[in-house]
Image (cartoon, coloured by chain):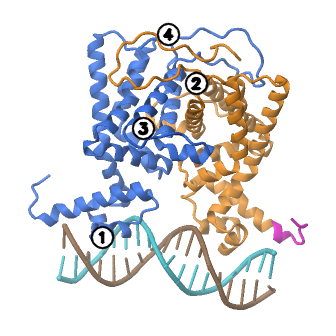
Chain colours: A blue, B orange, C cyan, D brown
Amino acid sequence: MSMAKSTTLKDSRDRILDAAARLFLAQGFEGTSMRQLASEAGVNLAATNYHFGSKEGLMQEVLRRHLDRLSEERLRTLDALERAAGGKPLKPSQVVEAFFGSLLHLADNDAEGGTTFLRLLGRTLTEPAGFIRAFLAEEHKDVIERYRQALFNALPDVPRVEIVWRFNFMLGAASYAIAGTDTLRLVTGWEVEESDGGERFERLMARLMAFLLGGLRAPLPEFPYPLPAKNRGPGQPEFDSRRGR
Amino acid sequence: MSMAKSTTLKDSRDRILDAAARLFLAQGFEGTSMRQLASEAGVNLAATNYHFGSKEGLMQEVLRRHLDRLSEERLRTLDALERAAGGKPLKPSQVVEAFFGSLLHLADNDAEGGTTFLRLLGRTLTEPAGFIRAFLAEEHKDVIERYRQALFNALPDVPRVEIVWRFNFMLGAASYAIAGTDTLRLVTGWEVEESDGGERFERLMARLMAFLLGGLRAPLPEFPYPLPAKNRGPGQPEFDSRRGR
DNA sequence: GTCTATACACCGATAGAC
DNA sequence: GTCTATCGGTGTATAGAC
């Protein structure tokens, strides 16, 4: 808020933030102790709690910086799309691409360490301390609400509960994708080619987007679900054009 | 291994397991202390480490019982399908339904608390201590390998790396789905109707399966990914019939 | 083998002196 | 703002009683 009166005043706080970002990424949230963090930042242990209240508060501050940029871009993108559409509903694919594509943009604009943030986010999603999910949800409540309405408008003939579920499935798939190749290799034992540059995220997003749109446009489920798979007649028609963009 | 010589011998170990299953479900893994667990089980603190080596070892033992049944069913189902197909490759939907549908079967056969296990698994996926994922992966390595081959055979014309990625996306979507309605409501603030009986899992699986199959059968991605969404010509054809079952 | 009592090293948080 | 000292908590290890 106020101007820095002395150099040590602001530096100490920033050194803690820097050390936190680095250590949380390298060792995870629970794997990093406040004592190690204070030591690497060159500050006293109690200084960390003075500036950020708690370990959780420190983590939230680390995430918030980049999350705000992400939220801003998501809102801005959706605004631009709706303005260009001029009152007509957007295509579902446009909404999905705006929401999840913003993650790729973040990794591209690497000026302020967007890639690092994305890796931290992935690492965090792999070992969420619980409160982090709640924090992420709270931080983006208005953004999600905007995209919810956009999806409803884009799919007027689809029951809203189905849209909500599929959006949730999409979030899950995206989380796993962001959590990274490590998990994939760990769970499956499969090797997947990856160049470690920014191209990595680009190819990942292309694959993810294709999958998400396929899932979003899938035929609606039938109830009750036929447990032992039997041959049935043709299902109900799709509710969205396959090729629409 | 050996027959129980005294009642206390076996009872103590089982009481720990029972208390662990109950508390881990109610409070999560990290939210449960070994002292509280030992107290509720009516045993000494050190007895827990004597029987299970560590807190992680205890959690693994809690999960293993049900996981073994899950693996067994997954292998048995795939065996039956391949036998019925008589050497011809399965349909992708058959493989996916066999793999993820087994979760629903587990919840149905509630004789041995399958539903409880599924909720514990969901709870666990929401706050995974990291080692849990590794444990799940190791425990099911052979099962995943079998399904990998089945998917490769079912989709001979699709590059294997794409199949691997989409399988990963499917795992992510399914994890979120299992993690349950709580997370969905937390993140989105949306209310979703749910009767709390076994019907709940049935409707969930129907929705999940429709989404997964849609994603699996989506057109393959194009590289490079067109960042600012533009209108393009028709994409490449799908690699699987929309209606095949 | 089964279990108990105890101790250890570490953690995050905080009160209070400076 | 920064520091020291300390508190109650954690998971774990071990010596020894039965």
Toward the viewer: A33 or B23? A33
Position of residue A168 measured from the top left corner of the image (x, y, whole percent): 50, 31
Q: Is the residue at mark 2 from the same chain as the one at mark 1?
A: no
Q: Is residue B199 visible?
A: no
The count of marks equals 4
Q: What secondary structure prevails in the magenta region?
A: loop
> Of the residues tagged 4 and 3, which is closer to the observer?
3
Mark 4 nearby-residue class (10 Å; few <14, some 14–19, many ≥20):
few
- Residue type at numbered disc 2: Phe
Looking at the rendering, the stretch of residues picked out in magenta corresponds to B1-10
Horizontally, residue B233 falls left or right of residue B20, namely left
Disc 4 to disc 2: CB gap under 8 Å: no
Q: CA distance from mark 4 to mark 1?
A: 59 Å
Which mark, by number, is residue B211?
2
Q: Is the residue at mark 4 from the same chain as the one at mark 3?
A: yes
- Chain under callout 2: B
The residue labelled by disc 3 is: A200
Q: Is the residue at mark 3 from the same chain as the one at mark 1?
A: yes
Q: CA distance from mark 3 to mark 1?
A: 40 Å
Q: CA distance from mark 2 to mark 1?
A: 49 Å
Placement of the C terminus of chain A among the 4 image quadrants: top left
